[in-house]
Image (cartoon, helix red, strand yellow):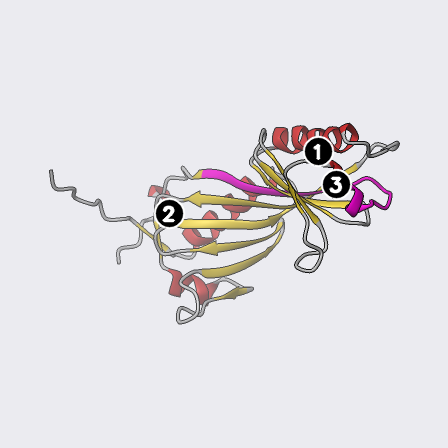
């Protein structure tokens, strides 16, 4: 495994937002049984799950709606999806008779991103040198590295792939990726990936 000299390591990651989990709070109790009768295409089985499952087609989101008036929404890929999705959910509920007076409170809870650093990572060495890291290859092939600034959890793999989770703001993702990359390079934990030959 050949380490790359620091000055030769290029920072050129590919970052993709995979899922933004957000909550919507209408600040009033909801009658889930009457919503079940009036809303089309929903799932509600209180014996299995205490909330209504509502799926939105555009953007493609799933909302879990609870009696408390709180909703957990998954599937957004960007902030436009969050804004549009929240509006569409509220519009759908109002259309079928739900009285919502106040402007709902929308909060980002978790952003998950997949990253490719395009370099190999010496995970064993990184596990030894990075504080707040856990590496148990018998249990999970990646290194779990908890960051404090920004507050996120990253999963690092030998292939140079990475998952960032726990971010509350989209702009925290590239900051976290750059900090992890710099730490890996400074500690000599990166190496060139072998080019894969493809037979024609």
Left or right: 187, with 28 as reference point: left
Q: CA distance from mark 1 to mark 2?
A: 49 Å
Q: Is residue 84 above or below residue 2?
A: above
Quadrant of the frame with the N terminus: bottom left
Left or right: 115, with 60 as reference point: left
**Pointer 3 local density, CA inside 10 Å: few below 14, some 14–19, many at least 20:** few
- The residue that label 3 is drawn on is 37
Q: CA distance from mark 1 to mark 3?
A: 17 Å
**Pointer 1 local density, CA inside 10 Å: few below 14, some 14–19, many at least 20:** many
Q: Is residue 174 above or below residue 163?
A: above
Over which residues does the magenta segment extend?
15-37
In the image, which is nearer the foreground, mark 1 or mark 2?
Answer: 1
Picture disc at residue 89: 1
Left or right: 135, with 65 as reference point: left
Q: Earlier in the sequence, mark 1 or mark 2?
A: 2
In the image, which is nearer the foreground, mark 2 or mark 3?
Answer: 3
Picture disc at residue 6: 2
Q: Report helix, strand or loop for mark 2.
A: helix
Q: Earlier in the sequence, mark 2 or mark 3?
A: 2
In percent of width and height, residue 111 lies at: 59, 44
């Amino acid at each position: 495994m050949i380490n790359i000299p620091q000055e030769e390591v290029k920072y050129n990651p590919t970052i993709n937002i995979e899922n933004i989990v957000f909550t919507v709070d209408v600040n009033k109790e909801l009658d889930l049984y009457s919503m079940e009768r009036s809303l089309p295409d929903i799932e509600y089985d209180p014996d299995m799950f205490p909330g209504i499952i509502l799926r939105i087609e555009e953007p493609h989101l799933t909302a879990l709606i609870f009696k408390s008036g709180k909703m957990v929404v998954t599937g957004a890929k960007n902030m436009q999806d969050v804004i549009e999705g929240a509006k569409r959910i509220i519009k759908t509920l109002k259309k079928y008779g739900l009285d919502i007076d106040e402007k709902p409170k929308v909060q980002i809870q978790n952003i998950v991103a997949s990253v490719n650093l395009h370099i190999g990572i010496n995970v064993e060495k990184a596990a030894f040198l990075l504080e707040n890291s856990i590496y148990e290859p018998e249990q999970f092939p990646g290194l779990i590295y908890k960051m404090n600034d920004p507050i996120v959890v990253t999963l690092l793999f030998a292939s140079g792939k990475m998952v960032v989770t726990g971010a509350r703001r989209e702009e925290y993702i590239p900051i976290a990726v750059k900090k992890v990359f710099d730490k890996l390079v400074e500690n000599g934990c990166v190496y060139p990936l072998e080019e894969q030959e493809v037979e024609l």
